[in-house]
Image (cartoon, rainbow, N blue to C red):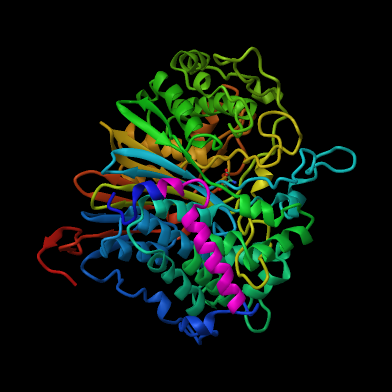
């Protein structure tokens, strides 16, 4: 990947803030002294402050319009020189302009994630964490920047238990100060930029600052999430997400977040130091502590990302590559896909009872093992090689029969964990609460073949409901991803990262990326990603069809949840075998964004949240038919 900085210097900076960073920090703290505590920079930045009337310039992203001949926008589009697929049309547009300026896929992804902090604060943001899977075409390697939140040093294994030793109800846990993990997103973005970026930080954060300061229209999902989470909000969030009369913002209202613009402006100048030390960090910590959490300033200044070796496995002449533990995601995707490969699932029709039955059984087996064995590998001894061992998986697959179920689901039985190589016996870890949070996934591929598959989160929609007063961003409640009951590899421990299901994945052929994929949706992320890959590669659907084809999900215990479109006849046929389905469909599960990489790039964005793919052609334009012309630029 073409990049600006010296590779040696950046590697040094990859995990903790570097000496360079320390110099920046000193300058940063000096600058703070100069402002004598008046931590507001709207005026000095010269960008203009204050709430505008109506939608301002930010929604007209400078240099971007879907009508321009170099860009093409839609739920599924094709282009030659760059592709972005995200949940947010504004964010996709910003990222596409970075590509047009010659920025690489990582540059575009960084700009995109900062914009999502502003325009989709319900799904992800600088108060959360995530996993960025990166293919560097020059180096011909996949690497992962892991910015998962960590439990504060003061976290205790019983912090989610009540006085009687019972788990505090999930609906209460999600609002506890103890649920807030030390955020990783800013450090993750800075690390990715250090390692792979080619554009100055200022360029990549600027669009997000302009959007926050000048305003943009609240979209349908943002409005729904403001309404749904209103009772959960602290005062700062209520103030930020209400109109002048104190009413919750609704679709089409202009949202301005000057506090967030200021926070991002500081980050623009001072990088991660602005976030992890000084007044922003102090306010973050005060907010968490006021809600009962133990987080301290030291927790923030100690925060480190890790650079992980991706998990990878051969499958169907391809290689599935993705975020390893502490996400269970891609490992469990691989587990399920390998079982389905052994069962030759492709012999059954796309919407046949057999197909749904095999997926449900394979997912049950995977889930039993996931919940029993997986956790943060810095703390837990996870038998991951055994779990993904071909012989072990073949033996697990052999247990699945087309004509019967693995367990007496109707009688309330669940599938039990296996005994993979390296394990004596399962410990029968307490089954955790089902997790159906939400998040955002996006993909970017540039004209040089670099690719990013990035899922980032604040856990539940709107996270903990706590906005840091005066700073404009929401805090995560990621630590609810730990088991509340202190047993098993995913129990709470200080500085540990909770087990995730996020599955940013790249499918490779002959060592080169061919498909990027990921989704939000808590536990169902794994299902969405596995079945999108199945639909693309075993059933040969095109990218948009592959992600919209109805899917099913189950844990090791019934019932099976399902999307609209799974035929009643198929459900009834499997019920006769003993499968148990939920009475009602879940409507839509997940929100998958993909990019297919062939001679051209095809991006597809899941319609369930108004996402948009934006393609970029350096020297061409798209006729309305989708045919590409040449020789003219806008
Ligand atoms: N907390 C979830 C996880 O890491 C992500 C949020 C979501 O559910 O989408 O698995």
The percent coordinates of residue 634 (x first, y second) are: 19, 72
Asked if residue 544 shows in the view, the reply is no
Q: Is residue 219 magenta?
A: no
Q: Is residue 31 magenta?
A: yes
Counting labels gives: 0
The answer to whether residue 353 is left or right of residue 182 is: left
In the figure, 178 relative to 236: above or below? Answer: above
Q: Residue 518 falls in which quadrant of the image? A: top left
Along the line of sight, which residue is nearer the eye, 309 or 580? 309
In the figure, 327 relative to 100: above or below? Answer: above
In the figure, 116 relative to 257: above or below? Answer: above
In the figure, 405 relative to 501: above or below? Answer: above
The percent coordinates of residue 366 (x first, y second) are: 55, 26
Residue at the (72%, 53%) spot, across then down: 295
Asked if residue 97 shows in the view, the reply is yes
Along the line of sight, which residue is nearer the eye, 363 or 18? 18
Residue at the (21%, 60%) spot, across then down: 617
Stretch of the chain drawn in magenta: 10-34
The answer to whether residue 149 is left or right of residue 80 is: right
Residue at the (48%, 62%) spot, across then down: 116
The answer to whether residue 317 is left or right of residue 556 is: left
The answer to whether residue 621 is left or right of residue 43 is: left
The percent coordinates of residue 413 (x first, y second) are: 69, 22
Residue at the (64%, 84%) spot, across then down: 244
SS majority, magenta:
helix
Along the line of sight, which residue is nearer the eye, 402 or 3? 3
Q: Please, which residue is most extreme toward the left here?
A: 631
Q: Residue 110 falls in which quadrant of the image? A: bottom left
Along the line of sight, which residue is nearer the eye, 131 or 434? 131
Q: Please, which residue is most extreme toward the bottom here?
A: 53
The percent coordinates of residue 219 (x first, y second) are: 50, 68
């Amino acid at each position: 990947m073409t990049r600006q900085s010296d590779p040696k210097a950046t590697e040094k900076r990859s995990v903790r803030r570097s000496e360079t960073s320390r110099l920046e920090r000193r300058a940063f703290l000096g600058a703070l002294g100069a402002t004598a505590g008046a931590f507001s920079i709207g005026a000095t930045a010269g960008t203009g402050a204050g709430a505008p009337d109506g939608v301002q310039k930010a929604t007209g992203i400078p240099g971007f319009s879907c009508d321009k001949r170099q860009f093409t926008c839609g739920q599924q589009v094709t282009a030659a020189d760059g592709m972005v697929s995200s949940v947010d049309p504004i964010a996709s547009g910003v990222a596409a302009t970075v590509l047009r300026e010659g920025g690489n896929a990582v540059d575009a992804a960084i700009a995109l994630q900062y914009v999502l902090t502003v325009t989709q604060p319900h799904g992800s943001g600088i108060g959360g964490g995530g996993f960025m899977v990166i293919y560097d075409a020059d180096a011909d390697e996949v690497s992962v920047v892991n910015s998962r939140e960590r439990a504060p040093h003061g976290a205790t294994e019983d912090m989610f238990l009540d006085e009687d030793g019972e788990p505090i109800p999930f609906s209460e846990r999600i609002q506890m100060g103890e649920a807030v993990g030390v955020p990783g997103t800013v450090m993750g973005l800075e690390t990715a930029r250090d390692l792979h970026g080619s554009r100055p930080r200022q360029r990549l954060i600027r669009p997000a600052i302009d959007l926050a300061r000048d305003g943009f229209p609240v979209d349908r999902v943002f409005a729904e999430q403001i309404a749904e989470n209103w009772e959960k909000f602290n005062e700062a969030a209520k103030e930020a997400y209400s109109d002048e009369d104190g009413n919750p913002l609704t679709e089409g209202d202009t949202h301005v977040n000057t506090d967030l613009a200021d926070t991002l402006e500081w980050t623009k100048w001072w990088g991660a130091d602005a976030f992890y030390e000084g007044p922003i960090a102090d306010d973050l910590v005060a907010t968490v502590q006021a809600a009962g959490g133990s987080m301290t300033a030291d927790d923030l200044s100690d925060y480190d990302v890790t650079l992980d070796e991706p998990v990878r496995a051969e499958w169907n002449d391809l290689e599935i590559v993705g975020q390893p533990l502490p996400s269970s995601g891609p490992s469990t995707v691989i587990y399920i896909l390998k079982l389905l490969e052994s069962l030759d699932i492709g012999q059954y029709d796309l919407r046949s009872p057999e197909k749904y039955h095999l997926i449900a059984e394979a997912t049950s087996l995977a889930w039993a093992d996931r919940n029993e064995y997986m956790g943060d590998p810095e703390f837990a001894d996870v038998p991951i090689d055994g779990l993904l061992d071909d012989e072990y998986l073949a033996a697990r697959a052999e247990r699945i029969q087309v004509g019967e179920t693995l367990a007496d689901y109707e009688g309330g039985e669940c599938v039990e964990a296996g005994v993979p190589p390296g394990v004596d016996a399962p410990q029968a870890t307490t089954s955790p609460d089902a997790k159906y949070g939400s998040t955002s996934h996006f993909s970017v591929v540039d004209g040089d073949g670099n690719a990013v598959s990035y899922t980032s989160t604040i856990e539940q929609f709107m996270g903990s409901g706590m906005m840091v007063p005066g700073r404009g961003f929401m805090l995560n409640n990621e630590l609810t991803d730990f088991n509340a009951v202190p047993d098993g590899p995913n129990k709470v421990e200080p500085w540990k990262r909770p087990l995730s299901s996020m599955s940013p994945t790249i499918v490779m052929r002959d060592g080169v990326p061919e498909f990027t994929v990921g989704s939000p949706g808590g536990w169902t992320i794994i299902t969405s990603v596995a079945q999108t890959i199945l639909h693309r590669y075993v059933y040969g659907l095109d990218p948009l069809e592959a992600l919209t084809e109805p899917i099913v999900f189950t844990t090791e215990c019934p019932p099976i949840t399902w999307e609209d479109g799974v035929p009643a006849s198929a459900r009834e046929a499997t019920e006769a075998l003993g499968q148990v389905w939920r009475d009602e469909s879940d409507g839509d599960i997940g929100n998958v964004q993909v990019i297919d990489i062939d001679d051209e790039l095809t991006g597809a964005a899941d319609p369930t949240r108004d996402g948009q793919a934006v393609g970029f052609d350096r020297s061409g334009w798209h006729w309305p038919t989708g045919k590409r012309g040449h020789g003219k630029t806008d």
